[in-house]
Image (cartoon, coloured by chain):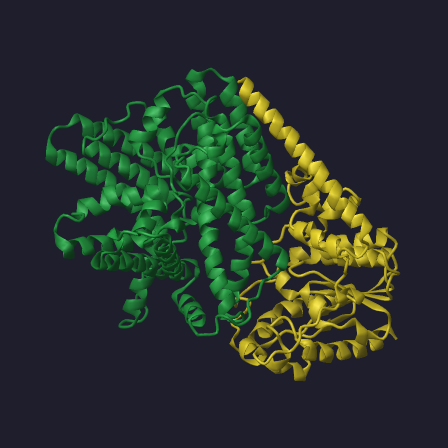
Chain colours: A yellow, B green
Amino acid sequence: LRKKILNIGLFVLLVFILDRSASFFLEHIYRKNKDINIISHYLNMSAPEILILGNSQVQQNIDPGFLKKRSYSLGFAASELGLQETLLDLIIKKGKKPEVLLLNVDPSFFTKSVKYNGTDVKFIKYYYDKDESVRYHIDAISPFERLKYIFDVYRFNGIFFYTLKRGLTGESPAYFKNGYLPIQPDISDSLRVSNSDRVIPPGEEFDSLKLVYLDHIIEQCKKDNIRLICYTSSLFGKYRLSNLSVSKQLQNYFSLKEVPYINYVSNTIKELNHPGYWNDPLHMNKMGTDIQSKDIQEKLKTILN
Amino acid sequence: MAFNSLVFLSFLALVYLLYFTLPKNFRWIILLASSVGFYMYGEPYYIFLLLATIIIDFFLALQLARTSNPLLKKTIFLCSLGINLSLLFVFKYFNFFAGIFNASVNNFHEGHSIPVLALALPVGISFYTFQEIGYMADVYRNRISPEKNLGKFMLFILFFPQLIAGPIEKASDLLPQLHTKGNASDKFLSGFCQILWGYFKKTVVADNLGLYVDAAYNHHGEVSGATLLIATYAFAFQIYCDFSGYCDIGIGIARTLGFDLSINFDNPYASKNISEFWRRWHITLSHWLKDYLYIPLGGSKEGKFNTYRNLFITMLLAGLWHGASFTFLIWGIFQGFCLILERILGIDKMNYSNVWSKIISMFITFNVLSIGWIYFRSENLLKANEILKKILSGHIFRGIETLKNEIFVTMLTGVIIVVVYESLLRKKMLAKNVTFISNKSNYLLAGWNAFLFFMIILFGVSDTSTFIYFQF
């Protein structure tokens, strides 16, 4: 029994030491390097006039450079509206709110088969002990979620190598400049995208319960005097067609809420019907992005005037 | 209740608290109650189905032992076998065969079809059905005496560390342990170490590999052949770390409670041929298939042709055991074909005299297995064929998509740690349930455990779903 107690005691002590020393070290890298990630970069620059928020389609399908006004893209691959809501809250609290919020709304999120319990909020779990709203949303994922944060270093779960690399090199990626991560066109784009069988299964129902995230964002923007404009990025081929019905439901919702909505799934840009402008049915290459960005600029001009 | 959920960890803490504070005589009751609770958490209604089969088999086994009439014995055994296999068929295979029947009949008479059943698959049905059949077969063959305590027999089937995905325990191994009071104290530390190793394999290695595999396999039309090849290799390690990780956790938990479960994996990718692989991969299933299917079919004692036939039937059913779909069927046929080919060419009895011949054989075996994994992982045959075609299309060295460098580095690091650690285990010949490090000093053991725990916190994927083998 003595051996067992000694061993477990030693184990607990070592875990504690490893946890605290590693989190101290990683925290030090974070504090030292203001450009360690795109959120940190954003929070340390002056607030843009237009902030574009959303998933990877924001990162790759819109070039803020086309939008005339000072604009910035904050897109996170595989993120959903739960993260956008929390992120907006964090940005406002840190005093970096934009004048206009251009929010990308992905219709596939609103299908019933997509189960969502807000886990993407953990993209920003670094702020768990730094922001009440982040903590609130993470704790809401499950009653047990908060247990993970007993360990300080858990805030760096999944980003250890990234943090280490950035700490050692000290360089920030070029795309931090405005948040746009271009995909260069490739000779195989047309063939690959044409062969894609990605679709939302037919008969998929609209999940109106998920509109609660949009409700919150709309309320937040009203409260903080941010002009909200929503849009759904262009999609390609069969995938676009399978998103059509959900995007129409979204259109109805936004019209009820009196929020301007640019729906590229229903109102396509004809040029983008060619697979050569795409990297996959959701993401465009730079040639496609330029076309959509120009179009958004025109539409924004009309809406904002 | 998945082992990798915080709900389960809370449940386990409660079980430990009750188990170690109650007198030893009552401990099995705690284990039985907690095992029922464990199953009911996910499957509140199917527990009645499970309990019904357990009770039926319990009484039929007692009846088997009482009777000396061979015909009656056979009838009782076949009755039990029929009940167990019928349930397995209804829940797991009915819709599959109904689909085949409907497709065939509709070619001739449109509109004639068997309705499919809207039944969810009871979790662990393939595992506990095989465990019950094994028990009945052993009683029938007079290898063991039937268990006389219904509660302990229930615990033998329901024991939560192995209920959902094995190891498929033999009654002769586990039942006697349930009758002894079990000395948990001398096994606790090595059990704890094995639990952590299992969690490491599952959350750090398998789940990170899974992110890459899913990204490639879910969009196979859009990624390169090279990416699909790497994803297939990644899946080979994902399924190993997922399943053996689950077994390590289960075996470790059982050890901390004072019970030894059977070893289920023995460094399988170090196999030099497919025959050896099946002696090292899912060992308890291989033993079950050998004891209760291959040997009753005649084994290898009735000439070459019959041996090949028996091997083929055994592996075909092994494929179907994993799931009712053509992909698993093809996977099983492929394994059977490889085993027969090895027998014909004498590869299974080959001597590997030098290191290079061993390494080359391991490499070839791993690649042959990887072809099988393509079918195992794909949702349908069409997709599997497309992936295989793309990998073999000659463009495999063009453009490997790494998803995210962070995940790629993590998964590579994880695989290296697993390979190095488990090769070391094998080398030390201490693979049987004990980690080699537990024989060293306290400091080393505590340090190793702390390292594993730290890795799980820092690199573990905590949001993915359940274990792959839960679906079987």
**Does the rendering let one see residue A162?**
yes
Q: Which of B283 and B465 is in front in this view?
A: B283
**Does the rendering let one see residue B2?**
no
Q: In this view, does B176 lie above or below B54?
A: above
The quarter of the displayed image where residue B261 is located: top left
Q: Which residue is drawn at 52% across and 54% down?
A: B210
The quarter of the displayed image where residue B386 is located: bottom left
Q: Nearer the viewer, residue B388 or A291?
A: B388
Name the side, left or right, on which B460 lies relative to A131.
left
The quarter of the displayed image where residue A283 is located: bottom right
Q: Position of residue A167 (x, y in %)?
A: 75, 52
Q: Is residue B382 above or below residue B353?
A: below
The furthest residue to the front: B354
Name the side, left or right, on which A85 lies relative to A114.
right
Q: Residue at x 41, y 40 (%)?
A: B427
Q: Where is residue B333 in the image (x, y as percent from the top left)?
A: 29, 59
Q: Is residue B238 above or below residue A172?
A: above
Q: Position of residue A109 (x, y in %)?
A: 63, 61
Q: Position of residue B169 (x, y in %)?
A: 34, 35
Name the side, left or right, on which A149 lies relative to B65.
right
Q: In this view, does A61 lie above or below B339?
A: below
Q: Residue at x 69, y 33 (%)?
A: A17
Name the side, left or right, on which B344 lies relative to B90.
left
